[in-house]
């Protein structure tokens, strides 16, 4: 969860919240020296969490617009 929190700071923010860039995820995995299988699992987990957060944010925005 701390990796996800740290990676969340790499999001683009403009008209809305953007996804975590894949380059940030890859760099994090490189710096952590993750083995190939651990890297694939890490990337999948981060992307799944990211999609859930973005879906939630979009749902909140739709609700606010009415």
Image (cartoon, helix red, strand yellow):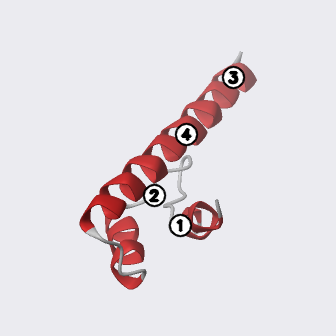
The reply to whether callout 3 and callout 2 are in contact (CB within 8 Å) is: no
What is the tally of numbered marks visible in this picture?
4
Per the image, label 1 sits on a secondary structure element best described as: helix
> What residue is shown at x 49% (from left), y 39% (from top)?
51
The reply to whether callout 1 and callout 2 are in contact (CB within 8 Å) is: yes
The residue singled out by tag 2 in the image is 20
Nearer the N terminus, badge 4 or badge 1? 1
Nearer the N terminus, badge 3 or badge 4? 4
Q: Position of residue 31 (x, y in %)?
A: 39, 84
Nearer the N terminus, badge 1 or badge 2? 1
From this view, report whether residue 35 is shown above or below residue 42: below
Residue 65 is marked as 3
Per the image, label 3 sits on a secondary structure element best described as: helix
> What residue is shown at x 70% (from left), y 29% (from top)?
60
- 47 or 45, which is in the foreground? 45
Foreground disc of the pair 4, 1? 1
Check the picture and name the quadrant holding the C terminus.
top right
Decide if residue 52 is on the left or right side of residue 42: right
Foreground disc of the pair 1, 3? 1
Nearer the N terminus, badge 1 or badge 3? 1
The reply to whether callout 3 and callout 4 are in contact (CB within 8 Å) is: no
Q: Residues within 10 Å of mark 4 (few under 14, many from 20)?
A: some
Q: Position of residue 14 (x, y in %)?
A: 53, 55
> What residue is shown at x 38% (from left), y 53% (from top)?
41
Per the image, label 4 sits on a secondary structure element best described as: helix
- 36 or 50, which is in the foreground? 36
The residue singled out by tag 1 in the image is 7
The residue singled out by tag 4 in the image is 54
Looking at the image, which residue sits at the far left? Answer: 36
Classify residue 6 by image quadrant.
bottom right
Q: Position of residue 55 (x, y in %)?
A: 55, 31
Nearer the N terminus, badge 3 or badge 2? 2
């Amino acid at each position: 969860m701390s990796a996800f929190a740290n990676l969340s700071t790499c999001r683009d923010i403009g008209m809305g919240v953007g996804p975590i860039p894949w380059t940030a995820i890859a760099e994090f995995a490189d710096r952590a020296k993750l083995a190939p299988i651990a890297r694939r699992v890490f990337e999948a987990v981060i992307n799944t969490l990211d999609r859930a957060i973005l879906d939630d944010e979009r749902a909140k925005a739709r609700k606010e617009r009415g």
